Structure formats: structure tokens, C-alpha cells
Amino acid sequence: MAAVQGEPLDVYLCSCTDCQRGTGSAFSYAALFPEAAVSIAGERRQYTHRGDSGRAIDSTFCPTCGTAIAFRAEGLPGTLGVPVGCFADPGFPRPSKLFWASRRHHWLELPDTIALIETQ
């Protein structure tokens, strides 16, 4: 379980194929925090893989249920990402952007307030 202090640095969606496969959905929805603001309790496992950008991503998950808990991306030093679903808060801040818009599903329409970033 991840606990955070303070507000996220950024909240975003990502449609890279790595996030699509990892979430089993058309995109991921994550919040980025300073590494020092995130604490992770309980049993966990970690694996390292390469994202669509070719950079390393360390993903932390619960070994009992498989839930994604947090991730550290080589391209975002000093931060930890937490999947927004971990907060179970429908009032969580809306995303500001969609990374890898070039790989989004053709039917995915987003409000104009969400910036479309073609890659990352």
C-alpha cells in the first residue's frame, strides 16, 4: 500500500503500449509525487522493464493480489508514480495530459483541457 503526503506534481494518462498491457486498459491514470512524499508499506515485489521510450521502469506491486502500487521511471528522476486507482477517490484531480497520444485507441476522445503529447 502506498501512502502519500501533499499534492501530486502532475496527474496524467498514458497510452503507451507498456501501460496498456500493464493495466489491461486503453491507458493508465497516474499521479506523480516527489519520491520523499511516498511511503510503501506491506509485502511487495518489483520488476524492471523498458517502456515505449526505451527507458527503464521499476514497477512495484502486491504479490498477493497483483495490484500495481507504484513505479519509478528512469525519465522522471526523483519521483514516484502512483496509479490513481490506488487512492479510490473519485474526487482525485483530473489528468492534465495524455502521453503517447500517438498510440491511443481511435475511439478515445478526451476533453480539450487534456494536452495530447504524441510520445514521451
Image (cartoon, helix red, strand yellow):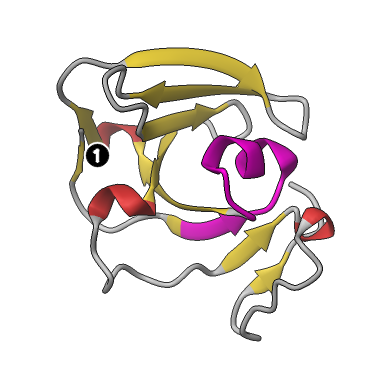
Rendered location of residue 111, percent (x, y)? 61, 84
Q: Is residue 12 magenta?
A: yes
Question: Is 73 within the magenta?
Answer: no
- Magenta range is 11-26
Q: How many marks?
A: 1
Residue 83: x and y in percent read 40, 46
Residue 32 vs residue 83, the one in the foreground: 83
- In this rendering, the answer to whether 106 lies above or below 60 is below
Q: Residue at x 35, y 40 (%)?
A: 34
Q: Visible in this render: residue 78?
A: no
Q: Residues within 10 Å of mark 1 (few under 14, many from 20)?
A: some
Residue 61 visible in the displayed image: yes
- Residue behind mark 1: 37
Q: From what the image shows, is residue 73 above or below residue 10? A: above
Secondary structure under the numbered disc 1 in the rendered image: helix
**Kind of residue at badge 1:** Ala
Coordinates of residue 42 in the picture (x, y in percent): 15, 20
